[in-house]
Amino acid sequence: MSGLDQARFREVLGHFATGVTIVTASDEGEPVGFSCQSFAALSLDPPMVILAPSRSSTSWPRIARAGAFCVNILGEHQESVCLAFAVSGGDKFDGVDWTPGVTGSPRITDSLARVECTLGAIYEGGDHELVTGHVVHMEIDEGSPLLFYRSGFGRFVA
């Protein structure tokens, strides 16, 4: 890593608080998803988002193949959902309430917000990929966000 210490890099960047999302899709009728904190708005015109899945993810290739995805922005009460989707393998949707969205991608019930997209461009980004999504549908619910800061979860207090 260009002579920089990876542990120090993680420590320093860990001081940037982020929201937490679950990116989902329907792959041949089966729900698939992963936890993602590397997510942001990219463009207002046209409405686009960007996310950065790990190259080692087993879920991401299935989502890319689906051609559409939903970014479920998690509320402060959904830490257990985030942890379930952060592991590789197993039935991540076991016990998770969801409904199909306009793209067919799973919309996780009680999420703070949901952004459904069609897949845009995919770029190389080191050990991750940079993925753009064209927003086709959005919705919000009430609540406060789940935050990730310094390797732990937190809550927003106004």
Image (spheres, rainbow, N blue to C red):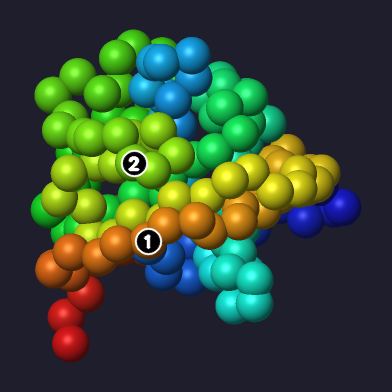
How busy is the neighbourhood of tag 2: few (under 14 within 10 Å), some, or many (20 plus)? some
Q: Quadrant of the C terminus?
A: bottom left
Nearer-the-camera pick, 84 or 101: 101
Q: Quadrant of residue 13?
A: bottom right
- Seen from this angle, which residue lies furthest front? 102
Looking at the image, residue 114 sits to the left or right of residue 80; the answer is right
The picture places residue 104, in percent across and down from the top left corner, at: 40, 33
- Disc on the earlier residue, 2 or 1: 2
Residue pointed to by mark 1: 138
Residue pointed to by mark 2: 101
User: Can residue 146 be seen in this snapshot?
Assistant: no
- What residue lies at 34% left-to-right and 55% top-to-bottom? 114
Kind of residue sitting beneath label 1: Met
User: Can residue 29 be seen in this snapshot?
Assistant: yes
Kind of residue sitting beneath label 2: Gly
The picture places residue 123, in percent across and down from the top left corner, at: 80, 47
- What residue lies at 41% left-to-right and 15% top-to-bottom? 29
Q: Quadrant of residue 49?
A: bottom right
The picture places residue 127, in percent across and down from the top left corner, at: 73, 38
- What residue lies at 52% left-to-right and 24% top-to-bottom? 59
- Seen from this angle, which residue lies furthest right? 2
Tell me how many marks there are. 2
